[in-house]
Amino acid sequence: MDRQVDVVVVGGGSTGCGVVRDLARRGLDTVLVEKGNLTHGTTGRMHGLLHSGGRYAVSDQKSAKECIEENMVLRDIASHCVEETGGLFVKRPEDSEEYFQEKLEGCRACDIPVEVLDGEEARRREPYLARDVEKAIALPDGAVDPFRLCVSNAADAREHGARVETHAPVTDVLVEDGEVVGVEIEHETGPGKRVHHEPGTTEEIRARHVVNATGAWAGNVGEMAGVDVEVRPSKGVMTVMNTRQVDTVINRCRPKGDADIIVPHETACILGTTDEEVDDPEDYPEEDWEVDLMIETLSELVPALEDARTLRSFWGVRPLYEPPGTGTEDPTDITRDYFLLDHGDRDDLPGMTTIVGGKLTTYRMMAESISDHVCETLDYEATCDTADAPLPGSESEARMEELMDEFGLRSPVARRSGQRLGSRADDVLDEYDPNPIVCNCESVTRAELQDAIGEAGSDLNAVRLRTRASMGNCQGGFCTHRIAAELAEEYPEPVVRDAEDELYQERWKGQRHALWGEQLSQAMLNHMLHATTMNRDGDPATLDEEVDFGAFDAGADDGAADADGAGSAGTAATDGGRANDDAAADGGR
Amino acid sequence: MAITSDVLVVGGGLAAVTAAVSAAREGADVRLVSHKASTLRQASGLIDALGYVPATEPAKPLRDGPPTAGRELDPDEWPDPEGPLADPFEGIDRLPESHPYRIVGGDALRDGLDLFDDLAGDAYRGGHTERNALVPTFGGAVKPTARYPAAAEAGLASDDRPMLVVGFRSLTEYDARAFAGRLEAAGVPFDVAGAEVEFAEAFRADAKITRLAKALDHDEAIDGVPAREALAKAVSPHLHDVVDEDGGVDRVERVGFPAFLGDDRGDEVRAELADRLGADVFEIPMGPPSLPGLRLEDRLFDALDAEGVRFETGNPVVGVDSASDGRVEAVAVDRKGRTAPYGADAFVLATGGLVGKGLDSDREGAREPVFDLYVDQPDDRYEWFVDDAFGDQPYARFGVRPDERCRPTDADGAVQYENVFAAGGVVGGADAAREKSASGVSLATGIVAGRQAATEANQ
């Protein structure tokens, strides 16, 4: 019989990764299963805002207080995932003065440090702000890299004995005698890291408790266990600009509305967002009006956005939840708070707990509370230390600064690598010599890619998320093949080819929403490079039919080619001359 | 004094040069104005005519409406293209009716290729036959092409001699082992091995390919050893890497390198390497910046000189200066911020497509910015694409719609200006990338537009 573990956590987003880390650090035997990559669902599809709490300071002060508290925690324990950009809530002439004051008071009431700036001072800090911005509230918003955060949590969990399985969708929740006793999963390419062409397997994992941390998908897992979880998924668009028009998070200071935030993120800016309830978190329309709305509305705050280059757009689905019977109509009014649903209490089905709602900034607090609950259920005593223990990569800020100066790469590249790797930079960058840049837009070197391949196998989207390779202006046009070539060190050719195609197609999906102006030119250039020059679409290696190589030109010196060639007398004479030159040029072969 | 000529060609790529030379050969006085470096530096240097007839219908009907998240789970699928075609002319009839080849005819392609052979001279091969060659390019795939640089000749995939592909640890464009594996997967009729060697390590980790070419041109010393000798030494241990079907070891008879084997003295570099290795040496066409593309550009501009075409680069043509009775009299050229009229009896527009900025676009639509010609396109920008990156992308066919004399027409098929002709990437209707027809379309429309412009000017 299969060994029983203490806890299976379903869902590799920020909540699931936080829970598995917390439980593992408390000494429980824990497994995390995720159907795609880590952050595959909502976590990987957000704007990367580290909330100061300012956004909720009027409407939901409980959430606001949690945000500012956790904001400060993450700056400590996840310094290599956070950029302390600061944030502004800006007021345009048509925005309500009364609301501005309410926002200010709300922030103060929630212990969010604020400073009021006049328009001139706001523009001194952010020169691209519109001339008619009247004033702003400065507060400690920040940018967070959700993927790096999740990977660090998962890595720490693994160091504490947990097992992490990605590309392992849950196919069934095991219920025996009215109790959840585990899950059945499908390893798409076998256990461990994902490698193309490796056969799939299934596995039953028996556990004393199952945590359903699948967010917008919580209903699907609930259904497998025979319980209802009424998530109300709500979609939001995010549009990625090719440069940082602003270095501070810019929020529009008004009650609520679409298209009211700009988050600087790494080399880009992300514009967000919309809030529309959808039926199915897997299948909802992605429409051009949403993209247009981002650009047009946010241009009121930063006029340069109107003509700036967008790289792509993507949509995420919020896992909103409200207790049955609340009946809020507008999804923007549904609480952002999180809910812990113990199915033993709620549905008379012990052995499983679902967590829904909430947001990335408070993921650690949510994880702590669900871990407390699980420990209580399992009658296990241990204390939580996740608010104090730094994540791998963030152990030493001083060391990170040192590393940025240390590596023999040109300095902006070293700086970027250092920022991504944090205190792991030493181990990673020392491995490779030569260490050329593979992705030029984002300055990603071979060493970083090889490190990521070591963790993620031939899954280049997972490699991309770890390194940012292929996420810049060219959207992979100049580097998907180069990234794939890095796989050849370890994997055979068909794996390289399929991995390359998968990454290229994924990059294309987001660009569909940015197909005008410079990005359309870029798309055309990418198409010419990959289809015309590399012939990726017509490569005989990928076609079903075999190619008769003998029917093609084998060179001017080839007797057979001349015999049935259709050349006229004129071209034949030219050929004769050429053949002689050729012999001379090649050193008399 | 006003600047005038019989024919004014706008653009600086293959189509522009073809049009300018063919107009000049008809006796016209020709001037060529181009904005900046042409897109040839991004091209492989291969001259494709027609390699495939790609599918224009998906395997099952496309989903209607905007993209949905769910389309990622249910992608549109496109059938394999027909090809590779051994005979580029044979597939023309099966292209869509709006394809430029269908409009100007296969003979225009034939004439264009002949003109190219004449201009390229010894530097190019393939003119001895109408059949396509299969040339390995840097992705490791072979691709059908009508003409290829002499430097690539020993790499043809229909040649059955054993091959070694060389890659360099510090160059990231391809991995030689995966390259060789892909050739094998294509079923090539020769044994092949790939070897990653150390050589370029002597240069900075991400040295430009042009830097390596220069070192080989000048045979610079690397750690005291001349560059060509050093390169041969790095490769020599791998000359017996090829293993045939029966497990026997073959000595390779040809060795492929990324296309950086010298710039000005490429022939000399290849000859010396061939001599040192005792095997033919060839270049693998690469992505941008592409030395074969740059070499071709130099050669074409030399040809312009030889044909007596005056040319100037650096000044964009920004619009029509004057027009009357359905004819353009002069275009406006931006010369360092001041606009000057350039008059001519006939104009050839060869400004390129979306890449070369011959077509411009915003969220509302795509435009031709010089003459404001009609560009056929779906109104909704969410109908400009399909979900498979390699499907029949409507945006890839954007461009002006020519008549049989290459004069752009409006939405109703009426000629827009009697004396304006279009050639190359600005002409729509072809999916040059999937068809492998980019150069051929430039040559066929270039020669027709050039001749017709000269005829128009002579009247």
Image (cartoon, rainbow, N blue to C red):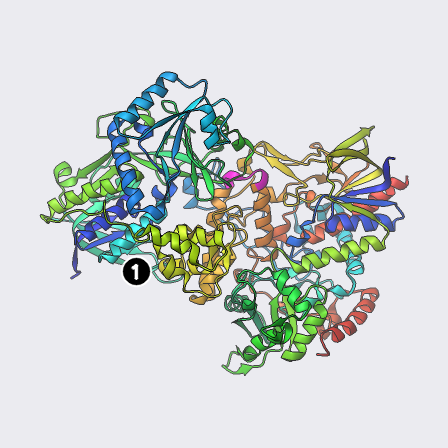
Q: Residue at x 88, y 35 (%)?
A: B1
> Does residue A185 appear anywhere in the picture?
no
Quarter the C terminus of chain A occupies: bottom right
- Name above or below for residue A390 compared with residue B214: above
Q: Is residue A516 magenta?
A: yes
In the image, taking residue A50 as reference, residue A265 lies left or right, namely: right
Q: Is residue A123 magenta?
A: no
Quarter the N terminus of chain A occupies: bottom left
Q: Main secondary structure of the magenta part?
A: helix
Q: Helix, strand or loop at disc 1?
A: loop
Q: Residue at x 62, y 62 (%)?
A: B211
In the image, taking residue A303 as reference, residue B209 lies left or right, namely: right
Q: Position of residue B213 (x, y in %)?
A: 65, 64
Count neighbours of disc 1 (C-alpha within 10 A) and say few if under 14, some if 14 to 19, many if 20 or more: many
Q: Which residues are magenta?
A: A512-518
Q: Quadrant of residue A235?
A: top left
Q: Position of residue A514 (x, y in %)?
A: 52, 39
Q: In the displayed orientation, state which residue is furthest to the left.
A: A379
